[in-house]
Amino acid sequence: MRRNGREVKREEKNREGVLHMRGNKKRIMILVIAICLVIGGVTGGVLYWKQSSENGDGNTKKGFPWNGCYRIIREDGSDLQLSFDKEKKEIKASSMAGGYANDIINSWVYDGEKIGIKIIRKSYNEILELKEDTDTTLAGTSLYMDEESPVVFEKYRDEPKDDEQNNQDTKRNVFEQLTIINQNTDFGPDGLDYEYTYDINQKEKYKDFIRKYNLDAITEGKKDLELMKALMNWLCDTCTHGSSSCYDSDSIAEIVEYGKENHLNCRYLSTVLSEVMRMYGIKAKVIWCYPKDDYFDDCHVVVQAYSEERKQWIMLDPTYRLVLQKKDGTYMDVRQLREWIVDNGDEITTMTPDNPNYLIANEDAGYTGEKGSTFNLVDYASYMAKNLCRMECISKNTTTGSKCFQNNYTIELISNQYNKPGISTFNRSEQERYNVLEKHVYTTDIDHFFELPE
């Protein structure tokens, strides 16, 4: 540019040359600016996508041309909804299985033509790349678990949703949830070979923790089911439930310390309870209970503990300080609760205590996040009808707090009827991709999934 400046000065002696060079200079500057804008836009978009992927900040501040709500319905009936707010430069996402939409967006980036969105789907991210196809559709691709497939989102609303439930026009009621769980009851052997391990009787590792909370005195003289209840009561008295409260740590001492002031969500309560039970010799593990949809912002997590006296699993739910029994005195585990929901169907919504199939809760059961709350079986069963379509646990149950997924693999129980949204129908041949050497495996063998420990 300096050289061009000197040339311009020399040409000032020639008036015709001055006009000519000024015109050339203006054209060159426009061309240079245009090239810089193109390069800056491309590299900026790439750099921002990398940054947002790593940091999860999720907003380019560039905006986008769309306004309103779009939806795709998968082959298996699950849906994903996107709400674009052009003025606020916001995107929200949800499905009929969820509620608070922003929870499932990891990040997004708009490059002036197409938009890239990372959606949180249980164990993996799904990456959508979309651009306008018609006035009412966005088309592009979905990349999920190394499978790429074409997708088309259709516009169903001209304005974005701005209420707390975001862009949901409908949310499944209990009857629809009961229909779904009844459509997923076909289980059977699949040949997967895995085993569960339980790191029990490790009180020496926790001696400071035990001393701080006086656990030996709380549990003195108690064993089996009474010991389980005593430990659950201690936890529920120490840390109450808060749906979004969590503290990621490999130390349950740190998690409990945080939970005393800030509450804990169901996963962290169950993680602590199962670890404390194993500390006192009880073979216990965490069970994640999921809705049918991969897109969800709400699920539930409970503890499955083995009773040596009864030779059975028993479900404990620290969110509700809950243990359930049938009227014949049989204690319920997670599998039995699922089967009870399927067997009783629509009767659940109107079931009263005089019904012979009514389940009995312990007297002090109640939602721990609300002082004085009492337990309502109909509400709980309706809630769990949504959350017991799929279940998941880990193979190595050890002393790692909320870091339990590290150096571990998860086992997810699905029915033979279940389709993974966005991917081809689940079948046995796909098991080769999901073997026990990988982090996440699918199984249809309900007996193996709930097998009793040796």
Image: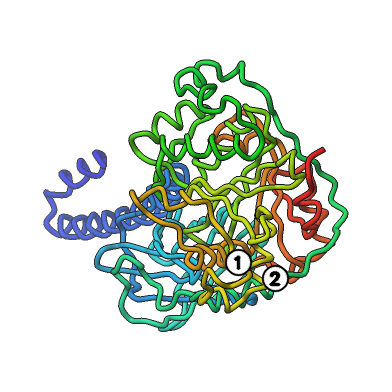
Q: Nearer the viewer, residue 40 or 318?
A: 318
The relative height of residue 240 versus residue 139 in the rendered view (above or below) is above
Residue, far right: 191
Residue count near mark 2 (Cα–Cα under 10 Å), binned few <14, some 14–19, many ≥20: some
Marks 1 and 2, how far apart in space? 9 Å
The relative height of residue 354 versus residue 399 in the rendered view (above or below) is below
In the image, 399: left or right of 82?
Answer: right
Position of residue 301 measured from the top left corner of the image (x, y, whole percent): 55, 50
* Mark 1 or mark 2, earlier in chain: 2
Q: Are marks 1 and 2 in contact (CB under 8 Å)?
A: yes
Label of residue 184 in the image? 2
Q: Residue at x 44, y 36 (%)?
A: 247
Q: Determine which residue is flagged by label 1.
A: 292
Position of residue 346 measured from the top left corner of the image (x, y, whole percent): 58, 79
Name the amino acid type tagged 2: Asn
Q: Nearer the viewer, residue 441 or 32?
A: 441
Q: Is residue 248 visible?
A: yes
Secondary structure under tag 2 reads loop
Q: Residue at x 11, y 49 (%)?
A: 13
Q: Quadrant of the N terminus?
A: top left
Position of residue 224 measured from the top left corner of the image (x, y, whole percent): 66, 36
Residue count near mark 1 (Cα–Cα under 10 Å), binned few <14, some 14–19, many ≥20: many
Position of residue 390 measured from the top left corner of the image (x, y, whole percent): 65, 60
The relative height of residue 141 versus residue 391 in the rendered view (above or below) is below
Q: Residue at x 38, y 70 (%)?
A: 83
Q: Nearer the viewer, residue 46 or 339?
A: 339
